[in-house]
Image (spheres, helix red, strand yellow):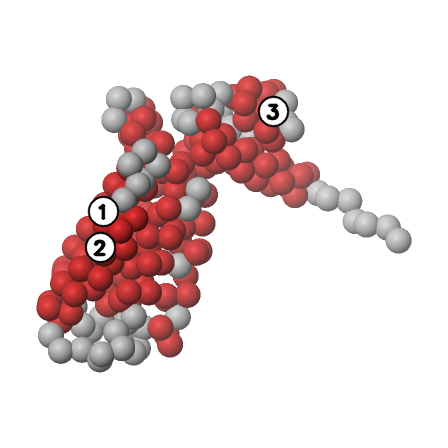
């Protein structure tokens, strides 16, 4: 049995995917500043020279990795966009738990690393800002859709972004100072605040 030979475009796409995956893995495991071209090259099994056939700089590769993290985040919660999940009452506790789980995932460590590094690196800050804006726009749009018609768009946007900020803080602190009892209580308090905002609701929500 013979297999068709891959085209140049297919080989190029496969190499780019390996490099992006290796960059994500490196930032997650050794941190942004230790993610050198040598580190990426070793993890991807691709020579440094080959990297520059696909990316003009390390920064371009980092930005591509950030965009892939954004894409994976949205793919993980894509089921919330389905019509059957947006026409009935939202299960807020499940939604909050999904947000927390995604923010605590290993891949979100990449975003936390990049955001901290961007504070003191103007080029990184400038380059990843559009990717971050796109991620937040998508998340806010998803939140507005999932919480309608219980909350108006601005209230839904505020709730969703507040949850992200809260769980980002948890994700950073829990490694050094875990407080599981408080972390679990937060979900019920947020759900209770939501019910106060929206008035009487189905007891199962």
Q: Quadrant of the C terminus?
A: bottom left
Q: Are marks 3 and 1 in contact (CB under 8 Å)?
A: no
**Mark 1 residue crowding within 10 angstroms, few (<14) / some (14–19) / many (20+):** few
Q: Position of residue 13 (x, y in %)?
A: 60, 41
Left or right of 68, for residue 128: left
Q: Please, is residue 54 above or below residue 178 in the view?
A: above
Left or right of 170, for residue 13: right
Q: Are marks 1 and 2 in contact (CB under 8 Å)?
A: yes
| Mark closest to the chain's N terminus, 1 or 2 | 1
- Badge 1 is on which residue? 166
**Which disc, if any, is residue 122?**
none
Q: Residue at x 19, y 51 (%)?
A: 162
- Badge 2 is on which residue? 186
Q: Residue at x 37, y 53 (%)?
A: 101
- Badge 3 is on which residue? 42
- Label 3 sits on a secondary structure element that is helix
Q: Residue at x 29, y 22 (%)?
A: 121
**Mark 2 residue crowding within 10 angstroms, few (<14) / some (14–19) / many (20+):** some
From the image, state whether disc 1 or disc 2 is nearer to you. 2
């Amino acid at each position: 049995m013979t297999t068709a030979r891959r085209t140049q475009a297919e080989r190029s796409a496969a190499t780019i995917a390996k490099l992006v995956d290796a960059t994500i893995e490196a930032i997650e495991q050794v941190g942004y500043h230790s993610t050198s071209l040598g580190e990426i090259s070793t993890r991807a099994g691709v020579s440094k020279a080959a990297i520059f056939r696909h990316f003009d700089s390390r920064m371009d590769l980092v930005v591509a990795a950030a965009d892939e993290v954004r894409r994976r985040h949205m793919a993980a919660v894509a089921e919330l966009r389905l019509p059957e999940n947006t026409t009935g009452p939202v299960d807020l506790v499940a939604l909050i738990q999904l947000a927390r789980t995604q923010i605590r995932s290993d891949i979100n460590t990449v975003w936390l690393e990049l955001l901290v590094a961007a504070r003191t690196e103007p080029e990184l800050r400038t380059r990843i800002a559009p990717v971050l804006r796109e991620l937040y726009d998508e998340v806010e749009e998803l939140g507005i859709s999932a919480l309608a018609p219980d909350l108006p768009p601005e209230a839904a946007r505020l709730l969703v972004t507040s949850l992200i900020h809260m769980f980002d803080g948890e994700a950073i602190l829990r490694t050094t100072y875990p407080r599981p009892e408080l972390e679990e209580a937060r979900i019920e308090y947020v759900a209770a605040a939501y019910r106060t905002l929206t008035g009487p609701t189905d007891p199962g929500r």
